Amino acid sequence: MARQKMKFEGYGQNFVVSQHQKLDWSDMIYLITLSSQNRNFKFWPREALEEYSREMQKIGEEIQANLSVLMGLKRDELKSLQGELKRGIRMNYYPTCSRPHLVLGISPHSDGTSFTLLLQDDDVTAL
C-alpha cells in the first residue's frame, strides 16, 4: 500500500515538499515495529517481520545496555532515561538507472535515533 500524505509507514519515496527537490533514486517501505500500538498491520507481511523485529529488539536492547555500561552508567540507565524506544524498519530498493553517474541512491542524512542497526545487502557496496 502506498504511503499516505504526511504518514511515515508504507511504500513509496520520501516526502516530496517541493517541485525543485532532488529526489532519491530509490523506492522504500517503512514500517513501525515498536511501540506495538503504533504498528499499522495493513503494511505487514506479519510472521516474518514479527520474528525479525523481536530479534532486532533483543539486539537493540543489548547494545543499549552495553552503551550504558561503556558510558559509566548502570546497565539499564539509558533505557530508563530514554523511555520506550521507537523502532522502525526501512528497506530500500534501487531500481536500475540508465544514467547511474547522474544520481545518488539516498541523499546525505542523519538518522533521528540513538543508534541504527544496518543490514547491508552483499550486492550493494555504496555505504
Image (spheres, grey):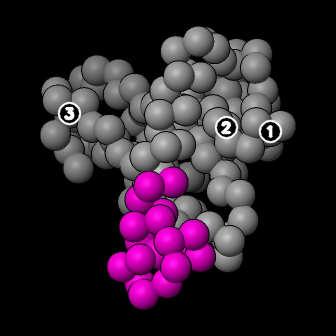
Amino acid at circle 2: Ile
Point out which mark residue 108 bears.
Answer: none
Q: Residue at x 41, y 71 (%)?
A: 67
Quadrant holding the N terminus: top right
Membership of 69 in magenta stretch: yes
User: Where 18 falls versus 53 (above or below)?
Assistant: below
Question: Is residue 120 visible to us here?
Answer: yes
- Magenta residues span 61-78
Q: Which residue is mark 2?
A: 32
- Residue 39 location, quadrant: top right
Mark 2, Cα crowd under 10 Å, few <14 / some 14-19 / many 20+, is many
The picture places residue 118, in percent across and down from the top left corner, at: 35, 45
Point out which mark residue 124 bears.
Answer: 3
Judged from the image, the secondary structure of the residue bearing numbered disc 3 is loop
Q: Is residue 100 left or right of residue 94?
A: left
Question: Is residue 19 visible to us here?
Answer: no
Mark 1, Cα crowd under 10 Å, few <14 / some 14-19 / many 20+, is few
Mark 3, Cα crowd under 10 Å, few <14 / some 14-19 / many 20+, is few
Q: CA distance from mark 1 to mark 3?
A: 31 Å
Q: Residue at x 53, y 43 (%)?
A: 57
Amino acid at circle 3: Val
Membership of 48 in magenta stretch: no
Amino acid at circle 1: Asn
Point out which mark residue 38 bears.
Answer: 1
User: Where 101 falls versus 80 (above or below)?
Assistant: above
Judged from the image, the secondary structure of the residue bearing numbered disc 1 is helix
